[in-house]
Amino acid sequence: MEPKISRRDFLKLALMAGLSAVVNPDRIIFQNESLPKPMPCFINPGGIPAKDSFEWVYNGHNGHFGPHEAIDFFSENNHKPFPVHAVASGKVEYVEFDNPSAGGFLAVRLNSPYDKYRVNYVHMQSSHPDFQKLSIGVHINQGDMLGIADGSPTADTTGVHLHLETWATMDDWSVRRVNPMIFLASDSCNQLNRTKWFFKKL
């Protein structure tokens, strides 16, 4: 009798075998690929430790195995909302209230000379007064209060957290996902060993 294999293990093995149907690698920056210069330095948006979850994961919501293209900041007990501040200065490029899977969603294009980067803040509380003030074109400064992380239908299953994404526009105008941990540091961020936070090609 042949041993059975779970869907999760099958997808994982398929991914390791390089099947393009499982994940599109063109969306992600891998090790040894150049990032747009100059690179920004971020502040911690919630004043709490980040979970470096920019990795291959199994998504229990859709049953797929693939990349989690962000890092997460969880509140102390995973249930208490917490304030979110801008990691860098820029202009609001897109804002959405009450997205079914993301809750409050905010996209900020960073100021020049870092304008090849965009930061997405996901699972914000749409009804918070600071979040309600945001609209396309509004300028925000690094450290400005953006609102609070208070979940969404998706976040409710994992606990209250901020899902933080960084997108980079490459020289060929393709948009790639970059691990925010690369930019999340103090004044010494340019001296970090950035390669440790890249996806490794399987």
Image (cartoon, rainbow, N blue to C red):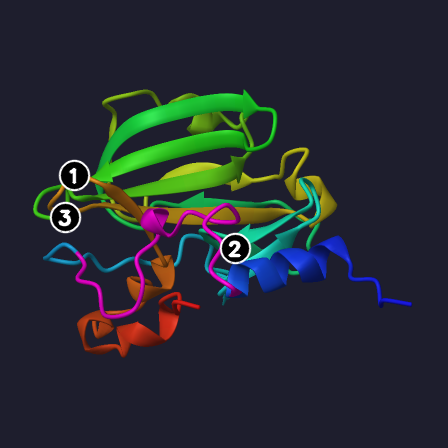
Say which amino acid is labelled 2. Asp
Q: In the current view of this chain or complex, which residue is farthest to the front?
A: 1
Q: Is residue 106 above or below residue 12?
A: above
Earlier-in-chain disc, 1 versus 3: 3
Q: Residue at x 27, y 79 (%)?
A: 193
Instruction: Categorize mark 2 by other alpha carbons within 10 Å: few (<14), some (14-19), many (20+).
Output: many
Image coordinates of residue 151 in percent, x first then y, are 62, 39
Amino acid on which disc 1 is placed: Trp
* Apparent side of residue 169 relative to residue 22 in the rendered image (left or right): left
Residue behind mark 2: 72
- Asked whether residue 47 is drawn in magenta, I would say no
How many residues crowd around disc 1 within 10 Å: few (fewer than 14), some, or many (20 or more)?
A: few
Q: Position of residue 189 (x, y in %)?
A: 24, 71
Q: Is residue 153 above or below residue 65?
A: above
Q: Nearer the viewer, residue 17 or 139?
A: 17
Could you tell me which secondary element the residue under label 2 belongs to? Answer: strand
